[in-house]
Amino acid sequence: MPQNTFIQKPQQANADRKYHYIDAKGRVLGRMATEAATYLRGKHKPVYTDFVDCGDFVVITNAKQLVLTGNKMSQKFYFSHSGYAGGAKTTPVSRVMEKDPRKVVYLAIKRMIRNNRLRGKQLARLKIYPGERTQGVKTAPKAS
């Protein structure tokens, strides 16, 4: 009995994309980020092919109300280096959350996706909103 390997076609993957809405209110950052990364990569689908971009769209709302476990809000830092001597910078998560909570969510998801040519395409389908998403939502007209 021959065993055939199924390979998702990129054209079919584009046609089969769906939207997943995640409300980050009260959710733990890491657990929410793994769920979003799974949807972006397409690993939740039975037709998953690792070298084809077969993931879905992900919309995350209420990013400023997510939770970090333990003492991460005071102990966790983001590190960057300019490449010059003495060019190291550390920024605490609490300061990044005050300034732009979307960046914390974006970096958590970005670092859970493989660093290859598909990562940029997959992250392009990620939308993060710091509060409730009210723009673009159509409401029914009032009956008079």
Image (spheres, rainbow, N blue to C red):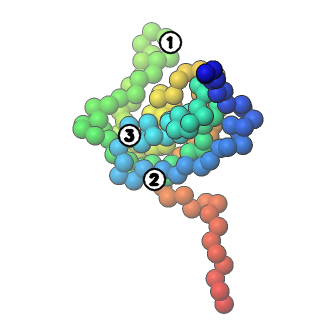
Residue located beneath label 2 in the image:
23
> Label 3: how many residues lie within 10 Å, few (<14), some (14-19) or many (20+)?
few
Which sits in the foreground, 5 or 53?
Answer: 5
Q: Secondary structure at mark 2?
A: strand
| Disc ID at residue 83 | 1
x, y percentage for residue 85?
A: 45, 9
Q: Is residue 52 visible?
A: no
Task: Say if 26 sits above or below 110 in the image.
Answer: below
Q: Position of residue 76 (x, y in %)?
A: 32, 31
Q: Quadrant of residue 139?
A: bottom right
Residue type beneath disc 2: Asp
Mark 2 against mark 1, which lies toward the viewer?
Answer: 2
Q: Which residue is mark 3?
A: 31
Q: CA distance from mark 3 to mark 1?
A: 33 Å
Task: Tell me the amino acid under the disc marked 3.
Answer: Arg
- Residue, x 54% and y 58% (percent of image)? 133
Residue 137 percent location from the top left of the image: 62, 63
Is the residue marked by circle 2 packed among few (<14), some (14-19), or many (20+) residues within 10 Å? Answer: some
Q: Earlier in the sequence, mark 3 or mark 1?
A: 3
Label 1: few (<14), some or many (≥20) within 10 Å?
A: few
Q: Amino acid at mark 1?
A: Gly
